[in-house]
Amino acid sequence: MKNFFTIIGGMGTLATESYMRILNQRTKTTKDQDYLDYIIVNHATVPDRTDYIIDHSKPSFLPSLVEDVKQQSLLQPVFMVIICNTAHYLYKEIQAATDIPIIHMPHLAITTMKKQYPQAKKIGLIATKGTLADHIYENEIKEAGFNISLGDQAVQDEVESLIYDDIKVNGSVDKEKYHHILNTMHDKFNCDVIVLGCTELSLAQEMAPDHGYDVIDAQSIIADKSIELGLKLRKGEEIDFSKIY
């Protein structure tokens, strides 16, 4: 197979499935051959990203992801995506392991937000405590010129419960809990836009969308970008990766 891309997933598996559903549903098709060419790596045993970020004595996820990108590089995909926001804590180290471009999901999400909501004043960020601790999204949002709110401990407890208890453990989305989180960030913390900084939250948005709030869904955005780039590959067009954000 030529002119394909690689998806590094499994962090977690249900979120990766969500990305693939969105990818395939949004690709315009009339026959089997219209779907995009890609390889999915569902590396479910990658050590927990948040555990390592919070406590560096815990197993690092870097060796697993470096191994993945090196293995995939032998097959020569044109680009890769990593379907885990928190894993981008070590993006530079992962990218350094290969010459194949890896699309930076948080950077893509916030550059898209800046174009879509230029008049927004305050941006809410909901994510794992690992993503909050590594400041990836916080720095991106501030560098884009926006104020940011992380909510409070009560919101974070709800977010963690939704991600871990409901989705990762039980494999389900608590609609009321998800909508309550969005409502709190909007009403209590006056957030114009809410960034979903975890792919499990993207799964929640897919399964229980609340259209009453403006959200930036990083996984949805990178799925759209994957389709855009995948169709360029299909047409034999050159891609300037310095201009994709």
Image (spheres, rainbow, N blue to C red):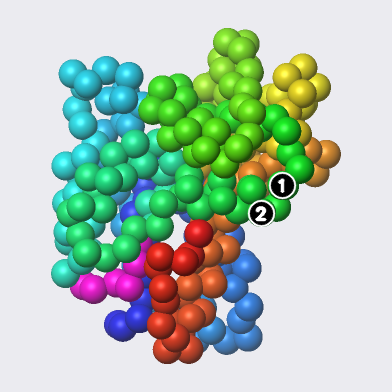
> Which region shows up in magenta?
75-80
- Was residue 79 drawn as part of the magenta stretch in this picture? yes
Which amino acid type corresponds to the residue marked 2 in the rendered image? Lys
x then y, percent, for residue 197: 53, 37
Q: Is residue 12 visible?
A: no
View extreme (right): residue: 212
x then y, percent, for residue 4: 36, 76
Which amino acid type corresponds to the residue marked 1 in the rendered image? Pro
Task: Answer above or below: position of 228 versus 188.
Answer: below
Q: Secondary structure at mark 1?
A: loop
- Return the mark for residue 208: none
The residue lying at 64 percent from left, 48 percent from top is: 114
Relative horizontal placement of residue 151, taking residue 167 as reference (left or right): right
Relative horizontal placement of residue 160, taking residue 122 as reference (left or right): left
The residue lying at 59 percent from left, 30 percent from top is: 125
The residue lying at 35 percent from left, 67 percent from top is: 79
Q: Quadrant of residue 241?
A: bottom left
x then y, percent, for residue 155: 63, 17
> What residue sits right under mark 2 in the picture?
115
Q: Is residue 57 visible?
A: yes
Relative horizontal placement of residue 155, taking residue 37 as reference (left or right): right
Whether the residues at callouts 1 and 2 have beta carbons within 8 Å, the answer is yes
Task: Answer above or below: position of 175 versus 234.
Answer: above
Q: Quadrant of the N terminus?
A: bottom left
> What residue sits right under mark 1 in the picture?
118
Task: Answer above or below: position of 35 versus 142.
Answer: below
- Was residue 166 drawn as part of the magenta stretch in this picture? no
Q: Secondary structure at mark 2?
A: helix
